[in-house]
Image (cartoon, rainbow, N blue to C red):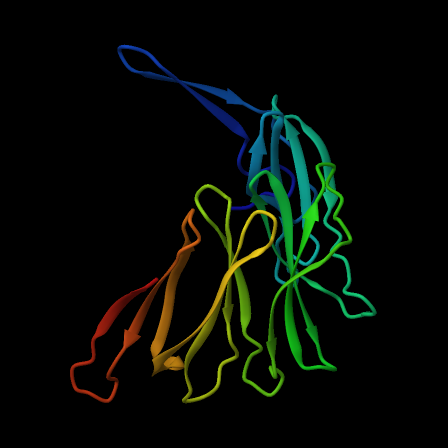
Amino acid sequence: MLKNSILAGVIISCLSFTSSAQDVVNVSWGPVIKSPNKTVTSQIIGSDDEGFYTLRTSYGLFSYNDSPYIERYDSKKSLTYSKQLSVPLPAKSKIKVEYQDIKYLKGQLVLFSSYLNKETDTYFSFANKVNKDGTVSPDMVELSRMENVSNKKNKGFFDFTLSTDSSKILVFQARPYEKNNTEKFDMKVFDSDLQTVYFKSIELPVRDKDVDLSNYIVDNEGNTYVLMSVDKAKEEKNSYEQKYFYK
C-alpha cells in the first residue's frame, strides 16, 4: 500500500568489497524522507561520483505525470534539491508539451517530451538537456515525427530505451493504428550528443491487430532488436504464436 507521507522505499547503498574468502557487502541506509501528498519516488535516474538523481511522480485516480520532479541526493543520501521539471514549449506554440521520460545519457540528464501540432496534424518527440541543478535547457532537439495522425484510431506513441552503457538512445515510434493494415513502426538511434546514428522504418507482412510487440532494445554499438508475438492464423483451427527477433 502506498503511504502519502513517508517514502515507501528507504534509499540504501550497497558497497561490495572483494576478499580472498568471500565478497562482503556493506549496506548504508539513508534517512527516511517525507514526501508530499500523493507523490512517490518512482525511479533512480542515474548517478555520478557525487550522488544520484531520482524522479518523483504523482499518483491517483485523476492525476498523470505531466509535471514530475527531479531530485538530487548527495553521496550521504541526503536530499539536496527537489525541482519540478519544466518542459519548454516549441517555438510559437501555446499547446502544452507532454512529459514522456528522462534518461541519464552518458552522464547527461536528458528530458524527453512529445507534442501534437493540430494545425499540421503532426506528432513530434523532443529532447532537452537537463542541467546539474535541475533546470531544463530551453534548446529543444527534434528527435522524430509522425504525420497525418488525427484521422486514425490513435496518434501512435514514442518510447525511449537506453543501451547498457548509456551511450545510445533508441526512439521507438509506433505509428497510428489503422484497421486491417499491416504493422508499421520506426526505430531511430541517437548517440550521447543526440546525433542520429541511423533511422529505419519497418513494415511487417502481418496485420497490426495480430502483432504484440513484447520488447525492444539497443546495444552499445547501436544495433536494435525487437521481440514480438504474432498470431499468424486466427482463422485456422489451431492458432499458434511465433516469436521473432529483428535486428
User: From what the image shows, is residue 124 above or below residue 7?
Assistant: below
In the foreground, 65 or 110:
110
**Horizontal placement of 142 versus 106: left or right?**
right
- Residue 86 in picture, x, y percent from top left: 76, 52
Extreme left residue here? 238
State the image quarter where residue 10 is shown: top right
**Horizontal placement of 155 versus 72: left or right?**
left
User: From what the image shows, is residue 4 above or below residue 27?
Assistant: below
- Residue 120 in picture, x, y percent from top left: 71, 81
- Residue 236 in picture, x, y percent from top left: 19, 87
Can see residue 34? no
State the image quarter where residue 52 is shown: top right
- For image coordinates 72% across by 58% down, the residue present is 140
State the image quarter where residue 228 is shown: bottom left
- Residue 66 in picture, x, y percent from top left: 68, 58
In the foreground, 202 or 19:
202
Can see residue 96? yes
- For image coordinates 49% across by 81% down, the residue present is 177
Where's the C terminus, which quadrant? bottom left
- For image coordinates 61% across by 84% down, the residue present is 148
Q: How many labels does the image show?
A: 0
